Amino acid sequence: MQAVWPAGREACLVEGARTRQVAALLNHRAKEAEHARLLGCAVKRFGGRFIYSHWSFTAFCLCRRVLGVRFELQVLLLTELVSTAYYRVLCAHSPDQPLADMCRLILRDEAGHVAFHRERLADAGRSSLGLYGALWQAQFWMLGHAAAAMLWVNHGPCLTAIGGTRSEYFGEVRRQLGRFIMALDRLSEPFIERANDSSFASPIAGKNSLKMPGIKRA
Ligand SMILES: [Fe+2]
């Protein structure tokens, strides 16, 4: 099967994809602000104390900024994944219905954020396939566990207080990381195959931005 894509059409599609990504990122910020508000309500509900700075947050911001945009986006993704694991365990053990409802609401939003990152990475041709993919996957798992450990150090006691366990939390972290990589591979595979076919190769990065008719996304 051959396809002819005028250069102008490719540029429009890529530009459109970038605009959608920027819009999605702005939407994420709004959702994260809402999550912060909800968590603030939870702190008040349980008579907790507000904190306005923490070493882990400072380290998180420093790390993600010093090492560039790509690394920052990966840190944001890993934060979404380990947070998902945390809220799932919190929801499962919550003795308080409004708290469980809040977790479900946050989990629903986080699923959308994770899907955004999956599409963004597939769009850039990222997968765990091949040697480079295996190396990428190894660093993804390693940094994912580092992010999970940091979350556990700071917030693990909240889970253990209501019956959650360390192994349950880290098991859920592994499940989220593994599911993400499998879904990314499923999404990337058709585009990698197409990229290997020179008749579909594009001079512009962003294979999913140049979706061919008939290619179904996972
Ligand atoms: Fe999020």
Image (spheres, rainbow, N blue to C red):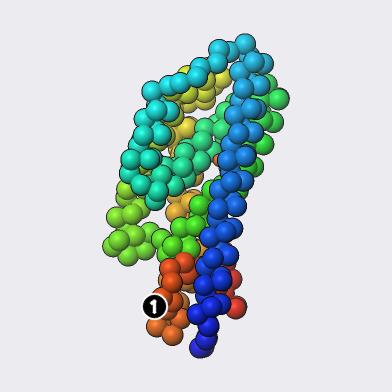
| Vertical position of residue 1 compared to residue 51: above or below | below
Picture quadrant of residue 130: bottom left
Q: In the image, what residue occupies the spot 59% across and 58% down?
A: 20
Q: Is residue 142 left or right of residue 218?
A: left
Rendered location of residue 106, percent (x, y): 62, 36
Task: Name the amino acid, label 1.
Answer: Asn
Expressed as whole percent of the image width and height from the top left, the position of residue 212 reads 56, 77
Depth check, front residue: 138 or 51 = 51
Residue 173 location, x and y as percent?
A: 46, 39
- Residue 94 appears in the rendering: no
The answer to whether residue 79 is visible is yes
Q: Which residue is mark 1?
A: 196
The residue lying furthest to the front in this view is 8
**In this rendering, would 45 be left or right of 49?**
right
The residue lying at 53 percent from left, 78 percent from top is 8
Location of the C terminus (image quadrant): bottom right
Q: Residue at x 44, y 62 (%)?
A: 124
